[in-house]
Amino acid sequence: MDDKKNIVILGGSYGGISTAHYLLKHALPKLLDSKSYRVVLISKTSQAMCRPAVPRALISDAMFPQDKLFVSIPDNFSQYTTGSFVFEQGTATALDYEKRTVSVLLAKDGDSGTELTITYHTLVIATGASTPSPLLGFTHDEVSLKSSWRLFREALPRARHIIIAGGGASGVEVAGELGEHLNGRAGWLSSTLSNPKVQITLLSGGSRILPYLRPAIARTAETYLAKVGVRTVHNTRVVTVAPPTAGVEDVAANATLTLDNGETLRADLYIPATGTLPNTDFVPVVLRCPDGRVNTDATTLRVIEAGERVYAIGDASAATRPAIHNIISMVPVLCANIKHDSLLGANQQAQVVGEDRVFNEDTRETQLVPIGKSKGVGAAMGMRLPSFLVWLIKGRDYWLWTTGNLWSGKQWTRSHDGLDRASFVTEVV
């Protein structure tokens, strides 16, 4: 690349796309010699996707308008001045924080297999995390995801027993969606669905499902699952899977599961929903926490020991609990500190630049979990929400109603640099 100062953002989902829009709209115009800077967004896929919608979307393309579920990242940045933004489809393979370079293996047509080394002025790590099941997110790209969905859908009509491992939100949502789609829902007077067409077993590794929510809410979720024919089994983990590729490389394979209690279960379809692994293999071990996430200052979002102007946000960062509402709240803080550090790097006086912007995570109980198309459980900012509100806010379309503004940047038309958290949350919602 030329001699421009590259603000490199790794990751094309909620954190990376929002950061790019915010910088282009509000931070770059305020930098000295702003035309010398360029935002370079690197993503392994050219499509942005409403990832929370996957538990329902994997069943059929008819569940959501496909042009809203998947949108082009480059198209949503065509609004900016030529030269201020570059998109590269590829995967980060190495980070040299001493030389301040990142290596990227390109994936787009014509350049596939080519490695590009970019010198960065500023680096934002927003590479997210991957799920063990290729049904539940971009383990590779949109082509691979859609291929996995197609194979799963072809096998679904033949399934008589589906096993889902994982009692977190993803596992519960997938179980609820499949249960209602395949079995329907029990009537008002029935606590369980008698004689479901398909047996669906949800294996929870703990003493209850949904550990981020209070026990009473988790119990309610379990009753909703029972009404769509889902059997929940607690304190049970999968030890081995035969064949080993079932549910991971082959989403349509029959599987034999050995559990930690010695029991053996056979499934026509197996879906591991046992959490995520951060996409940080390219980051030097010295910059990572034991869980693989990037070691990040929780208030300034700077990567510890990585040198000047290196930051991390989202599921790849150890700054907060992985959650979309945390990512959205972090974006204005991150971008304010990028602007702050860039001005200092350009020899602007510290008293003129001002202090760091500080992020304070809202640790109150917040999680919404739809269970099928009409029920759900959850809490927001510590307040338990009734099923109807969970459906209204998230369960109707799994946040698809919010992503248009995020992907296009309209979410960030206004600068939120000076707003307190309460004002920001009110405006965003």
Image (spheres, rainbow, N blue to C red):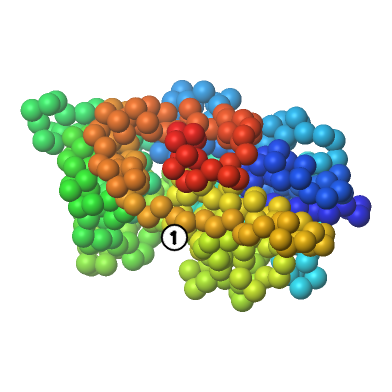
**Picture quarter containing residue 281?**
bottom right
Q: Nearer the viewer, residue 234 or 126?
A: 126
Q: Residue at x 36, y 64 (%)?
A: 240
Q: In the image as oriented, which residue stretches furthest toward the front?
A: 351
Q: In the image as oriented, which residue stretches furthest toward the bottom?
A: 286
The spot of residue 121 in percent (x, y) is 79, 59
- Is residue 134 among what the camera can see? no
Q: Residue at x 66, y 42 (%)?
A: 22
Decide if residue 336 is on the left or right side of residue 184: right
- Element at badge 1? loop
The spot of residue 268 in percent (x, y) is 34, 45
**Crowdedness of circle 1 by 10 Å Cα count: few (<14), some, many (20+)?**
few
Q: How many marks?
A: 1
Q: Where 399 sits versus 144, above or below?
A: above
Q: Residue at x 71, y 38 (%)?
A: 25
The spot of residue 314 in percent (x, y) is 54, 53
Identify the residue position indicated by label 1 in the image.
Answer: 244
The spot of residue 282 in percent (x, y) is 66, 65
**Picture quarter containing residue 67?**
top right
Decide if residue 7 is on the left or right side of residue 161: right
Q: Nearer the viewer, residue 342 or 389?
A: 342
Decide if residue 230 is on the left or right side of residue 48: left
- Is residue 7 among what the camera can see? yes
**Circle 1: residue type:** Pro
Q: In the image as oriented, which residue stretches furthest toward the left?
A: 189
Quarter holding the C terminus?
top left
Q: Nearer the viewer, residue 163 or 297?
A: 297
Q: Nearer the viewer, residue 220 or 261?
A: 220
Decide if residue 141 is on the left or right side of residue 234: right
